[in-house]
Image (cartoon, rainbow, N blue to C red):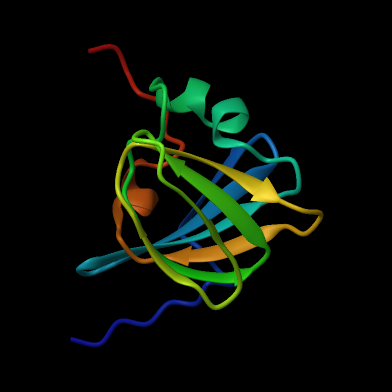
Amino acid sequence: MLEVKTIEKPDERRDFPRGHIEVLHLSGLDFAVGTFEPGWRWTESVREIAGTDSCQVGHRGIVARGRMRIRMDDGAESEIGPGDVFVVSPGHEARVVGDEAVVLYDVAGEMATEYAKAKGPS
């Protein structure tokens, strides 16, 4: 099998306040490009969409530009920036740091399938 797509033509786009993700669905891989504008904060932009108190989506990827501060539900914190490869478990809050938009590539698949999708009634 050989399957190739370009991030210039995503399969779908999900918009939320001060940001969006663009998603590519390939066989065995869901890939997302996240763009988060200055002032973006998960609790203000995505919490209502997700219906949870913190982000319950796991992330694995690399930051292309900008800086983001991540705080885990247990209090652990870190800042990620250009060139940083990251793994973030479910149960966190994040915000953009500074005046530059954050662009990151997420290869975990959870971001592409679950992030910023409204949850239906249980």
Quick one: 61 or 69, which is closer to the camera?
69
Q: What residue do we see at 55% from left, 35% from top?
A: 42
Quick one: 7 or 51, which is closer to the camera?
51
Quick one: 3 or 92, which is closer to the camera?
92
* 109 lies above or below 1: above
106 on left or right of 96? left
Q: Quadrant of residue 44?
A: top right
* 34 lies above or below 95: below
Q: Residue furthest bottom?
A: 2
60 on left or right of 103? left
Q: Assign the C terminus to one quadrant of the image.
A: top left
Residue 20: x and y in percent read: 60, 47
* 76 lies above or below 9: above
Quick one: 116 or 41, which is closer to the camera?
41
Q: What residue do we see at 77% from left, 59% from top?
A: 100
Residue 64: x and y in percent read: 59, 73
Residue 73: x and y in percent read: 37, 33
Q: Residue furthest top?
A: 121
Q: What residue do we see at 54% from left, 64% from top?
A: 104
Q: Assign the N terminus to one quadrant of the image.
A: bottom left
Q: What residue do we see at 67% from left, 40% from top?
A: 40
